[in-house]
Image (cartoon, rainbow, N blue to C red):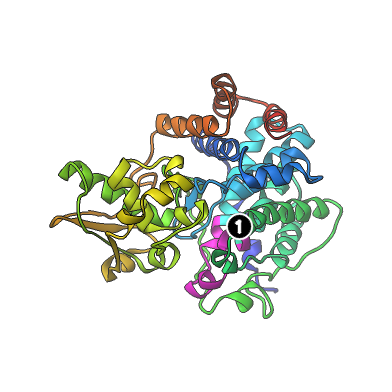
Amino acid sequence: MTQESLTEKLAKHLTLRVDEATRTRARLHLLDWLGCVAGARESKVAALLAKSHICPVETSSWLGNVLEMDDIHRTAILHPGPVIWQPVIDAAEDAGVSMDKALDSAVRGYEAMVAVGSTFDAHHYAHYHPTATAGAFGAAAAVVSIHSLKPNQLLDALGNAGSTTGGLWQMRHEAVMTKQFHTATAAQNGYFAAFMARSGITGPRMILEGPQGLYAATCRSPKPMEYPKRWRIWDVSFKPWGACRHAHPAIDAALELQALLGKLDGEILVETYSDAITFCDNLNPKTVHQAKFSLQHAIAVVAVSGAPTLADFEPAMINKLAKQRAKVTLRECKDISARYPEHYGARVTCNKQVVEMIDTLGDPERPMSEAQVIDKARALMAWGGLSKKQADKAVKLALEGDDPAAIYKMLGKWLG
């Protein structure tokens, strides 16, 4: 008897029923993604895409990550929303399915993407962008679910989606738009793999663990794949601040320390986990993107302005905060690193007072309320130039709507 592959086990897991509470949770992630897309409407990426021949709705797969406020799964260290929602809305509109069907499919897409991403090891993360490498699996699973394809077609779609996976971190070292290219490519590859599976195009079953599969190419010690009883969309965090997630625990600790002291005045020490420093040690950011990946800048913002806003990462503030950034020292803390990635933590010291955060605002242990998620989405939509009336409509469609085609049409108006 042929050994059951990991994608075959995953496919069986994805047949679990999606309950109403999980659909409600998915609606919040849909709204969060819509806010991120709307907020990026006036970005340089959006302006360039407007000159391309890409369908306006398809450009949304590029925009969900631009502001660095997209949802994130901690242990997989990836962002499902920017990859999953565009192909779900696109396929749902094409197939004419209900909102419940679309939400169920998104939940399965999140599950597949996180399930695969959670098996990657530190060697993989050192070189590869997990949102890109795991994303196509999630998009494929979601679109297969929209079309109610057969189990063997799901396996074909997962195999072919996985065979195209990639996404190198080199773009972190250059002022480029490759991160957005990664999310769009993952979404499109997954969609295309599912589309072709409908026509009988076959794919490899052992794409993960095979001798020339994804693990052999990109991992040294892949972790076991797990199949929890609860859908993992519940473990996906929301991001309150417009910066790299690795900067968020330090922001949270600094905000609490500021409330304790009245103001952060003097030298500030930030102790955190190794990856946070690897990704976010930048004393002198020059661009908006670099500022979002600078712990020094994030803490300088808190010291001067309090809770960060998107405007705090724009060029005017980058120039203004140079002296304040110089007061911030970074140091890896072994006990915080030992808790990562299950817990994203930081310890901030100023004037001999210390505040430590074990978990970050928006994580399951410190969840954002529904009202906070809605407020975040509204703020992003305003940043992207939408009116209150347009924001009201988006909130209603995401949280109460029963027709994915209405969201598809709305996105077309936003991005057309």
Name the one closer to the observer, 405 or 327: 327
Residue, disc 1: 179
| The quarter of the displayed image where residue 206 is located | bottom right
Is label 1 in a helix, a strand or a loop? helix
* x, y percent for residue 23: 54, 35
Furthest-right residue in view? 199
The amino acid on which the numbered mark 1 sits, given as a three-letter code, is Lys
Is residue 350 left or right of 403 when viewed as pictured?
Answer: left
Quadrant of the frame with the C terminus: top right
Residue 216 in sight here: yes
10 Å crowding of disc 1: few (<14), some (14-19), many (20+): many
* x, y percent for residue 291: 45, 54
What's the magenta region? 114-133
Quadrant of the frame with the N terminus: bottom right
| The quarter of the displayed image where residue 56 is located | top right
- Main secondary structure of the magenta stretch: helix
Is 283 contained in the magenta span?
no
Furthest-left residue in view? 352
